[in-house]
Amino acid sequence: MAVASVIVEFENGTGEAVLNSLARINNVSVYGVKDNQIVTVIESDDIKSVEDTIKALYAVDKVIGVYPVFAGDYE
């Protein structure tokens, strides 16, 4: 299993819309929101799927940055 912790930064005043969009992306769990940042964890079968999910986070409307904090691939 591959896991990544990711900080998602969004535009001012758009937190609810971004949270709603993140809820539609498979393998993404939200663990907290502070200011204009959301702490998420991505879990998937392999690291390639995690990379694809990070790309999907970049594509969310009103997201201005996606910052991986930790990533690992565990058997």
Image (cartoon, rainbow, N blue to C red):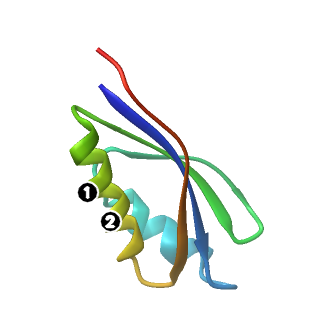
Quarter of the rendering containing residue 65: bottom right
17 or 56, nearer to the observer:
56
26 or 55, nearer to the observer:
55
* Residue 75 image position (x, y, % from top left): 28, 14
> Which quarter of the rendering shows the N terminus?
top left
**Measuring 67% from the left and 85% from the top, which residue is drawn there?**
13
**Measuring 31% from the left and 53% from the top, which residue is drawn there?**
51
Outermost residue to the right: 35
Q: Which mark is residue 52?
A: 1
Q: Are marks 2 and 1 in contact (CB under 8 Å)?
A: yes
**Measuring 42% from the left and 62% from the top, which residue is drawn there?**
22
**Amino acid residing under circle 2:** Lys
Left/right of residue 63 with respect to residue 1 in the rendered view? right
What is the C-alpha distance between the residues marked 2 and 1?
5 Å
Q: Is residue 73 above or below residue 57?
A: above
Quarter of the rendering containing residue 64: bottom right
* Residue 71 image position (x, y, % from top left): 46, 38
Q: Which residue is mark 2?
A: 55
14 or 36, nearer to the observer:
36
43 or 22, nearer to the observer:
43
* Residue 17 image position (x, y, % from top left): 50, 77
- Number of numbered discs present? 2
**Amino acid residing under circle 1:** Asp
Q: Is residue 62 above or below residue 66?
A: below
Callout 2 crowding tier (Cα within 10 Å): few <14, some 14–19, many ≥20? few
